[in-house]
Image (cartoon, rainbow, N blue to C red):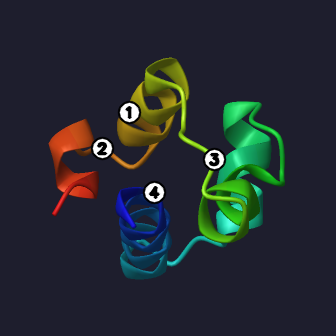
């Protein structure tokens, strides 16, 4: 459940910044299946990847958490 929340938070922040999730992942050098794996496979994200995304989105990793 937490992984799905993190994925949704990332998607929401991308939407707020008017950037597609796929473009953000590509720019960050992260596998394009990153969000899918969290949502559908309940795969836990690596903290270093979350840090890269947070830096790109100009936020904190804490912003991804409930």
Residue 1 horizontal/vertical position (percent): 39, 67
Residue 2 horizontal/vertical position (percent): 35, 59
Q: Which residue is mark 1?
A: 55
Q: Secondary structure at mark 4?
A: helix
> At 74% from the left edge and 36% from the top edge, which residue is drawn?
30
In three-dimensional space, the C-alpha distance between marks 2 and 4, rounded to whole angstroms, equals 20 Å
> At 72% from the left edge and 49% from the top edge, which residue is drawn?
34
| CA neighbours of label 2 inside 10 A, class few (<14), some (14 to 19), many (20+) | few
Q: Which residue is mark 3?
A: 43
Pointer 3 or 1: first along the chain: 3
| CA neighbours of label 4 inside 10 A, class few (<14), some (14 to 19), many (20+) | many
In three-dimensional space, the C-alpha distance between marks 2 and 1, rounded to whole angstroms, equals 5 Å
Does residue 60 appear anywhere in the picture?
no
> Relative to 16, is 31 above or below?
above
> Relative to 9, is 57 above or below?
above
Picture mark count = 4
Q: Are marks 2 and 1 in contact (CB under 8 Å)?
A: yes
In three-dimensional space, the C-alpha distance between marks 4 and 3, rounded to whole angstroms, equals 7 Å
Q: Which residue is mark 4?
A: 3
Q: Are marks 3 and 1 in contact (CB under 8 Å)?
A: no
């Amino acid at each position: 459940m937490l992984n799905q929340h993190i994925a949704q938070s990332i998607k929401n922040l991308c939407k707020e910044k008017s950037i597609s999730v796929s473009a953000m992942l590509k720019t960050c050098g992260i596998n394009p299946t990153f969000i899918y794996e969290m949502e559908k496979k309940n795969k836990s994200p690596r903290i270093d990847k979350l840090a890269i995304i947070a830096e790109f989105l100009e936020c904190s990793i804490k912003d991804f958490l409930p």
